[in-house]
Amino acid sequence: MIETALVLGGSSEIAQAILLELKPLGLKRAVLAVRSPQEIEPLLDSLLPGLDLAVCSWDATDASGSAQMVADAGTTLGRIDLVVCAVGMLGHHAGRGMTPEAIGLMVQTNFAGPASALSAAAEFLVDQNKADSSRVATLLVLSSVAAARPRKSNFVYGSTKAGLDSFARGLGDALVGTGVRVMVLRPGFVRSRMTTGLEPAPFASDPRQVAVYAARELGKKRSKEVVWIPGKLGPLFAVFTNLPSALWRKIAAER
């Protein structure tokens, strides 16, 4: 049962939808780690009604503060059953034309910072389970189909997601036997505030649809390690990732 959660990137619509989807299943308390707590605190009652919530300040680009943030969240919650990693920058057309500084910020925000925080969270959860191994703890990492194969319109974003995706799956292998599991979500295009004004790609979903998939897998004793959303994207990208480059460029076009 998942009663408590720490959310890295608490302002994420997908993360908030996941919390709401888990509430009827037993979620009671959550800590939202965000860059600007003052912006989200007035909205909590309307965004996440019925949950006992706390907000803490956390900057994904400052790896030095991650371990303490996780420890403080553990103190607040008593036990962390779930860590949701949903921090990131939108990467539509994040390719040629980006400045070196913008690329560095995207790498830090989408990959290096979350990876550091996930590492800190994993160690905390392992130590937590040594004292109480009665429940499984989960690291839920929001990746993207963009991680599966780079394309010219967003290869910077795609590479950062690929890095985090690979890190998370390797971390999951390293945690086998500790009572801590890792689940990677790979949604396609998600209609949300961040994608307003963009043309949806085929098989687009919304935050609640992503949350339904996540909650369904989290409730299983033997869950999938990688969850494609919608599920049909898995077999589709199994083909796409093996296509000749010239053909892939035609299929991906400007998407």
Image (cartoon, rainbow, N blue to C red):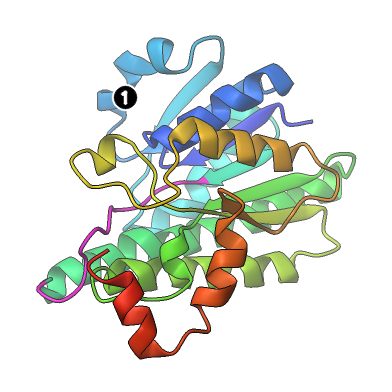
Check disc 1: other Cα within 10 Å, few if <14, some if 14-19, many if 20+.
some
Q: Does the magenta portion include 93?
A: yes
Residue at the spot 16% in from the left edge and 66% down from the top edge: 102
Looking at the figure, which quarter contains the C terminus?
Answer: bottom left
Q: In the image, 161: left or right of 67?
A: left
Q: Which residues are magenta?
A: 85-97
- Residue 230 in the image, given as x and y percentages of width and height: 56, 48
Residue at the image point whose x is 22% and y is 38% from the top: 196
Q: Quadrant of residue 110?
A: bottom left
Determine which residue is flagged by label 1.
Answer: 40
Query: Residue 145 location in percent, x, y?
Result: 46, 61
Q: Amino acid at mark 1?
A: Ile
Residue at 48% in and 23% down: 54
Q: Nearer the viewer, residue 18 or 107?
A: 18
Rendering quarter of residue 81: top right
Residue 114 falls in image quadrant: bottom left
* Image coordinates for residue 220, horizontal then vertical, percent: 81, 41
